[in-house]
Amino acid sequence: MKQHFIQLSLLLLLALSSLASGTETSPDYFFIIFQWPATKCDSKAGGCCLPKKGKPVLNDFIISEFQPFYAQDGVIPTNCTTKSKFEPSKIADLVPSLERNWPSLSCPSRDSKKLWKEEWLEYGTCSESVLNQHDYFAAALKAQKQINLLEIFADAGIKPNGTYYPGQAINKAVKKAGLNEALVECRNDENGVNAVLDKVTLCATTKGGKKPCPGMFWICDSTNGNAVQFLPPSLPTSL
């Protein structure tokens, strides 16, 4: 088991290397990173704040990042061009959905458009060969809806009620949904164990469809038997 995790760790470090790319190639697929809002809001390191505009979903997974992956090079390129600017008018029709499902929860409170600008410049510009600005955000929203991670967990009896769930149970639920394996990230629990479910990375096609991930299972702190606590929904630390 230990060797298995070491191998996966090395694979993950390769897959998640964020390198700038100036070549005109296309991403093979995307990593979509989901975040559980309650974990961020419960964090001792700053908590969370509601954005200045919109009403984000706090009882479902929100989008944290949507990263293009270039399989041939084994990289997630970032900041691919300074020529492409973020133009809010191009995603005006998506704003209501983005405010709910891809909000900024950072403190101090800010307009979520600042977050979207950061995400577009860092990752979106590296996917322009297949997705323009509007389609980049639309694909992320589509992937979130198609995957429906909270429903995948609920179908497996994994519910946000403060219970600790075995890592293998989470992996089994994701596999049953046809997504192969997930990368799970945690924050520290009250005992200092890195075991509170924070983020889950899955894969999506360049059109926002579901796609099995190529073996990314890595479940937080193994000293806890790979058990992960799924916190109940909570309000932001600052309204």
Image: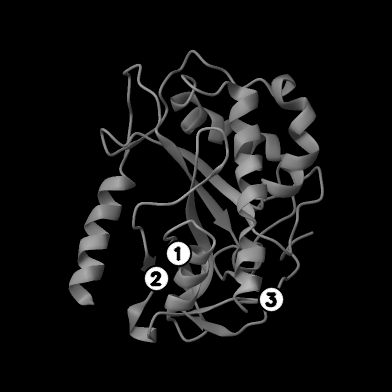
**Tag 3 residue:** 232
The residues tagged by marks 3 and 1 sit, at their Cα atoms, a distance apart of: 17 Å
Disc marking residue 184? 1
Cα separation, mark 2 vs mark 3, equals: 20 Å
Q: How is the image coloured?
A: one colour
3D distance between C-alphas at marks 2 and 1: 5 Å
Q: Position of residue 120 (x, y in %)?
A: 55, 30
Q: Tell me the number on the disc at residue 219.
A: 2
SS at mark 1 in the image: strand
- Counting other residues with Cα less than 10 Å from the Cα at mark 3, is it few (<14), some (14-19), or many (20 or more)? some
User: In front here: 57 or 193?
Assistant: 57
Tell me the quadrant of the picture where the C terminus can be found.
Answer: bottom right
For image coordinates 76% across by 52% down, the residue present is 56
User: Dots 2 and 1: beta carbons under 8 Å?
Assistant: yes
Residue shown at the point (67%, 65%) measured from the top left: 151
Q: Position of residue 89 (x, y in %)?
A: 74, 20
Residue 12: image tag: none
State which tag comes first along the sequence, 2 or 3: 2
Q: Quadrant of the N terminus?
A: bottom left
Q: Is residue 37 left or right of residue 12?
A: right
Residues marked 3 and 1 touching at CB (< 8 Å): no
**Mark 2 / mark 1, whichever is N-terminal:** 1
Q: Residues within 10 Å of mark 1 (few under 14, many from 20)?
A: many
Closer to the observer: label 2 or label 3? 2
Q: Amino acid at mark 1?
A: Val
* 130 with respect to 9 (left or right): right
Occupied quadrant, residue 116: top right
Instruction: Please state the horizontal and vertical placement of residue 233, each as a whole percent of the image.
Output: 72, 71
